[in-house]
């Protein structure tokens, strides 16, 4: 499943720096970052991960069904994301394991965050505890 896209903005980077207290110069200082390896400011990796989580929620499949996040595994930051880049997320169910005592099961999602140039910028596995389907689901769910 693929999500809609979202452009990473100047406001996103400034607000995330404030919320996270991560004022690293590569994110916040134009003069510094112009002379850096990347030649421009880079969005916080955790900002992009957070945006990806929001994009996944917008699919409607996770809304009202997620009990808790359990883990993020094998996460790779493979390409920088710059202000003005547009990312979308590709999600794939890797496996699922029932955990009845918790009222659901763990669903492991393979996640790729892809930019406007079709380059994978991040990828890994999200382990999410999700509610179980009722034993007698409504007709719309069968």
Image (cartoon, rainbow, N blue to C red):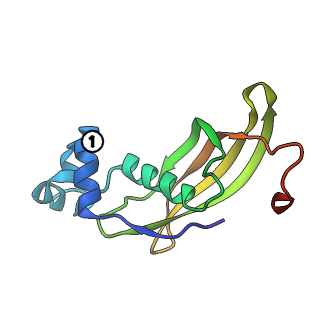
The part of the image, by quadrant, that contains residue 22 is top left
The front one of 29 and 58 is 58
* Vertical position of residue 23 compared to residue 28: above or below: above
Q: Position of residue 81 (x, y in %)?
A: 37, 61
Q: Position of residue 46 (x, y in %)?
A: 39, 46
Q: Residue furthest bottom?
A: 117
Numbered marks: total:
1
**Left or right of 96: which side holds 8?**
left
Q: Residue furthest left?
A: 31
The front one of 76 and 130 is 130
Q: Residue furthest top?
A: 101
Q: Residues within 10 Å of mark 1 (few under 14, many from 20)?
A: few
- Judging from the image, what secondary structure is the residue with disc 1 in? helix
Judging by the rendered image, the residue that carries numbered circle 1 is 19
* Vertical position of residue 139 compared to residue 4: above or below: above
- Quarter of the image for the N terminus: give it: bottom right
The front one of 106 and 116 is 106
The part of the image, by quadrant, that contains residue 70 is top right
Residue at the location (60% across, 36% down)?
A: 68
**Left or right of 138: which side holds 94?**
left
Residue at the location (54% across, 60% down)?
A: 58
Residue at the location (77% across, 24% down)?
A: 101
Q: Position of residue 9 (x, y in %)?
A: 29, 64
């Amino acid at each position: 499943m693929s999500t809609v896209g979202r452009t990473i903005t100047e406001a996103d980077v400034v607000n995330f720096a404030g919320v996270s207290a991560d004022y690293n110069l590569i994110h916040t200082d134009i003069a510094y970052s112009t002379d850096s390896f990347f030649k421009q400011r880079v969005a916080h990796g955790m900002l992009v991960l957070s945006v990806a989580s929001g994009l996944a929620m917008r699919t409607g499949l996770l809304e009202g069904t997620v009990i808790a996040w359990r883990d993020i595994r094998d996460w790779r930051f493979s390409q920088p994301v710059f202000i003005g880049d547009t990312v979308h997320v590709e999600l794939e169910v890797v496996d699922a394991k029932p955990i009845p005592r918790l009222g659901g099961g763990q669903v492991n999602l393979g996640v790729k965050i892809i930019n406007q140039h079709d380059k994978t910028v991040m990828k890994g596995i999200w382990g999410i505890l999700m509610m179980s389907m009722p034993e007698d689901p409504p007709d719309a769910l069968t």
